[in-house]
Amino acid sequence: MQFQQQPAQQADSLDLMVNMGPQHPSTHGVFRLVIWIDGERIVRAEPHIGYLHRGSEKLCEGEQYGQIITLFDRLDYVSNLNCELAFCLTVEKLMGLEVPDRASCIRVVLCELNRIASHMLFYGVFGLDAGAMTPILYGFRERERVQSLFERVTGARMMHNYIRVGGVKEDLPSDFAERLGELTALLRAGIDECDELLTNNELFLSRTKGVGAIGGSEGVDYGLSGPSLRAAGVAEDVRVSEPYSIYDRFDYGIPVGTYGDCFDRYYVRMEEMRQSLRIVDQAMEQMEPGPVSAKVRRIARPPKGEAYLRTESPRGDFGVYLVSDGSDKPYRVKVRAPSFANLQALQRLLRGAYVADAVVILGSIDIVLGEVDR
């Protein structure tokens, strides 16, 4: 008996759509990510935002300048003080206000501590994204130490409403220097401990090295900024390129990566925390007794005009554009949110990646949806 060999039939390729979010536990907020996969590879990705849109910029038009600070607390709700600082600096630029030196030092100390608290949250959650449970326990331990000091200074753990137009709400507690000294010593040891726990872990390296890589020039084209851009080898830091407040008085380094992959985005943030501690130490050394607020009316009325100012938030280039009509309420407030801009590169980073790496790549960008959607 003879059998005739039939030619093999070519199976048609079928892209499968997978919907992640907006309730998915790994999407870092109410963020929906739709991906099309061919086998284990992502063919196309489509981010959907807007689930947390509250109209913050429009709300600013109906609030007095002093009231708007509470709205900025709720944009990047992981680094509230950095958002407060950006808005107050923009108003002060429009008004031509000179902030007392002590107030500027207090602002820098608190904002750099907030940067460390923000990066510690990233450290823990990114560990979860990569499949490690222990890092979030270490990260939250360090973050809570910073939050406790913030509560002592501002009266609130997160929504501080502490930085004001012309300075800060009130002077530091009498025991602040002692408490800060204890905190920075613990943070130095904690950062080293976190570094040792996760950075050289073989499984973590295999999940992050070479995953979601992007080059420096391409990152600039996509609008990346902050650690996501510095990880690609671009040494761009607004605190250095366009110094604001008193940052030009400090000596510190700008950590940069080489390959622009998930590991570089992670480790740049680890090194940034060490540099923030250097800034905190220098700011405390330069802090002298004196007033903590300029002589300014309680209800600010900037002159007619417009101003734009950039700051370096934990997520990147955070800008505020302000238009004043001379009244006690702004005519227009526009925020340049780094998380929103960084998300532009997500489609490019996910294309061709494994499905299992989608959450790791998204986590490495470190978005905050309150800032994305506003």
Image (cartoon, rainbow, N blue to C red):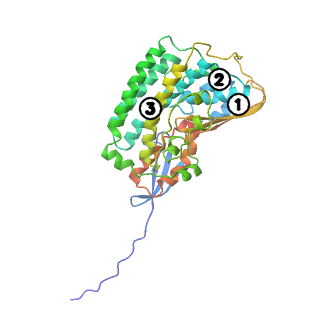
Mark positioned earlier in the residue sequence (2 or 1): 1
Q: Residue at x 43, y 67 (%)?
A: 13
- Viewer-nearest of discs 3 and 1: 3
Q: CA distance from mark 2 to mark 3?
A: 34 Å
Judge left or right: residue 281 versus residue 70.
left
Q: Amino acid at mark 3?
A: Arg
Does 346 sit above or below residue 145?
below
Task: Locate the N terminus and report the quarter of the image it occupies.
Answer: bottom left
Q: Is residue 247 visible?
A: yes
Mark positioned earlier in the residue sequence (2 or 3): 2
Q: CA distance from mark 3 to mark 1?
A: 39 Å
Q: Residue at x 42, y 41 (%)?
A: 267
Q: Amino acid at mark 2?
A: Gln
For mark 1, does the 10 Å Cα neighbourhood hold few (<14), some (14 to 19), or many (20 or more) residues? some
Q: Position of residue 96 (x, y in %)?
A: 73, 25
Q: Position of residue 91 (x, y in %)?
A: 69, 27
Q: Which residue is mark 3?
A: 274
Do the residues bearing badges 3 and 1 touch, measured as CB atoms within 8 Å?
A: no
Q: Which residue is mark 1?
A: 61
Residue 67 disc label: 2
